[in-house]
Image: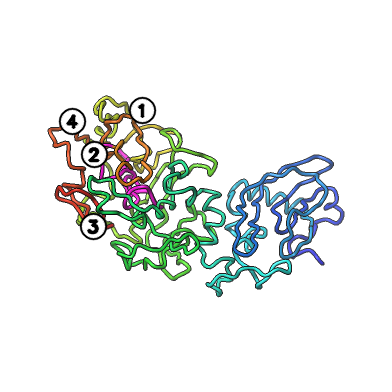
């Protein structure tokens, strides 16, 4: 069989001295040059049989090995790529590590789609969304085949034993039974489907929040919410492949606001810290407004609060001096940044612990995670407990980490409001008086956010 178009040697004979041996479907590429070994970063493909997903990932393989196949793909042949093509592949992988797959690189299509209902002579599961020729019942199931327990670990572990908390959070909390840690939490369950953005994933037993026909504050159909509602599966130049202004999702939703900017953590990172965290640069609340509008600015959800704009000098001072309940005015601006209450700033970096400055802004991400959390509405701390140490005691849910370690630490609302420095009642929890409830509010026992 002739090599595919674009893989012919640029110069006859050169492919023998300097080439990449590439086995389609195996995810191996090696570079050989004059007897010297080189190393090339390539995406390992997903090997699927029936409904079983064997998690793939990035693999770095040594060069100068004899041509061999680690898994046969649709072609099942080993071909050689000229040094010119090899150079382009290396440069592309260095510039955009994800481009080899999500931007339609080598063998990328076969990672998610099947041309016919077979591969290597065996029947391949064809998703119910047959027009897309997916390898699973939906795009979300395909995405989770790589990113659920693999790259990113966005749906991994169990609700009571999740991976370390970081970045966008974990969808596994959608499977929690009860999130309510108020004093009457056992009588008023808050089910896990209210833990954040509700993926529709039959394979994982997840469905949309039945309270909502459309996204709160907007018009995105809740029953269609999935990974590709926010992330472009075919790749773009935006952070985490988030849709940009003017892009259209596979189900026809058009984005108006541009993609936000951020500097993320490598997938190999574990727990986020003050010097290893996502740096939110700009545009986050506006991007969320594509589906939710500027929620909470007009008392939607029973709670009014700014969702965008710079912190004034008074709130910057509070953020920078607050170092927990026992040290509410003893913090240092050089180490004031808290990943659990992140600010948006165009000058931020993942390694910086610097606190708030004149360009620091509040955003949706300051209080919420993008995916889900072990608290209602993907909140970064539980609104139903007075002290963080009480999180999980009533419901049995996973307690969100206490960044200060102090057992007396109160709500992280105080990172910006520092009620310990004022004459203020110690109870109920903040939202118990300040709204944000469909089942509580105005001093009642529990908060079940209607958002």
Residue 439, image x and y in percent?
Answer: 21, 56
Count of numbered tags: 4
The mark found on residue 421 in the picture is: 4
Which of 380 and 348 lies nearest the eye of the viewer? 380
Cα distance between the residues tagged 1 and 3: 36 Å
Dot 1 corresponds to which residue?
A: 334
Cα distance between the residues tagged 4 and 3: 28 Å
Q: Nearer the viewer, mark 2 or mark 4?
A: 2
**Helix or strand or loop: what does disc 3 sit on?**
helix
**Helix or strand or loop: what does disc 2 sit on?**
loop
- Residue that appears at 31% across and 51% down: 376
Residue 276, image x and y in percent?
Answer: 46, 36
How is the structure coloured here? rainbow
Cα distance between the residues tagged 4 and 1: 21 Å
The mark found on residue 301 in the picture is: 3
- Residue that appears at 48% across and 68% down: 250
Q: Given the current orientation, which residue lies at the most extreme front position?
A: 187
For residue 8, side relative to residue 304 (left or right): right
> What's drawn in magenta, residue-wise?
358-387
**Helix or strand or loop: what does disc 1 sit on?**
helix
Q: Given the current orientation, which residue lies at the most extreme left position?
A: 423
Dot 2 corresponds to which residue?
A: 386
Is 215 situated above or below 270? below
Cα distance between the residues tagged 1 and 2: 28 Å
Query: Going from the N terminus, do you reach mark 3 or mark 2 first?
Result: 3
């Amino acid at each position: 069989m002739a090599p595919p178009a674009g893989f012919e040697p640029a110069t006859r004979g050169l492919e023998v001295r300097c080439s990449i041996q590439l086995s389609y479907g195996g995810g191996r590429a090696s570079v050989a040059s004059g007897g010297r070994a080189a190393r090339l970063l390539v995406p390992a493909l997903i090997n699927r049989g029936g409904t079983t997903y064997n998690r793939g990932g990035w693999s770095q393989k040594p060069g100068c090995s004899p041509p061999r196949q680690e898994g046969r793909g649709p072609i099942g042949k080993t071909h050689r790529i000229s040094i010119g093509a090899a150079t382009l592949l290396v440069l592309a992988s260095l510039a955009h590590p994800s481009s080899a797959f999500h931007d339609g690189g080598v063998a990328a299509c076969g990672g998610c789609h099947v041309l016919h209902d077979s591969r290597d002579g065996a029947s391949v599961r064809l998703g119910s969304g047959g027009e897309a020729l997916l390898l699973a019942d939906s795009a979300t199931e395909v995405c989770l085949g790589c990113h659920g327990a693999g790259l990113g670990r966005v749906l991994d572990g169990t609700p009571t034993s999740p991976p370390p908390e970081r970045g966008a959070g974990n969808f596994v909390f959608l499977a929690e039974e009860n999130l309510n840690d108020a004093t009457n939490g056992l009588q008023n369950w808050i089910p896990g489907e209210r833990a954040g953005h509700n993926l529709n994933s039959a394979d994982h037993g997840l469905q949309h929040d039945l309270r909502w026909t459309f996204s709160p504050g907007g018009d995105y159909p809740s029953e269609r919410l999935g990974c590709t509602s926010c992330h472009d599966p075919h790749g773009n130049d935006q952070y985490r492949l988030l849709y940009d202004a003017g892009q259209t999702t596979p189900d026809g939703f058009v984005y108006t606001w541009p993609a936000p900017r951020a500097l993320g953590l490598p997938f190999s990172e574990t727990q986020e810290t003050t010097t290893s965290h996502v740096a939110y640069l700009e545009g986050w609340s506006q991007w969320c407004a594509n589906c939710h509008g500027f929620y909470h600015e007009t008392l939607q959800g029973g709670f009014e609060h700014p969702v965008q704009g710079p912190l004034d000098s008074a709130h910057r001072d509070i953020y920078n001096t607050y170092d927990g309940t026992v040290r509410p005015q003893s913090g240092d601006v050089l180490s004031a940044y808290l990943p659990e209450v992140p600010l948006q700033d165009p000058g931020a970096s993942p390694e910086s612990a610097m606190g708030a400055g004149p360009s620091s802004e509040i955003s949706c991400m300051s209080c919420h995670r993008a995916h889900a959390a072990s608290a209602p509405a993907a909140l970064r701390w539980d609104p139903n407990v007075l002290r963080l140490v009480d999180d999980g005691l009533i419901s049995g849910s996973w307690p969100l980490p206490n960044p200060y370690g102090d057992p007396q630490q109160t709500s992280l609302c105080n990172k910006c409001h520092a009620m310990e420095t004022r004459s203020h009642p110690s109870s109920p929890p903040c939202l118990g008086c300040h709204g944000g409830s469909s089942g509580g509010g105005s001093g009642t026992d529990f908060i079940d956010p209607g958002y």
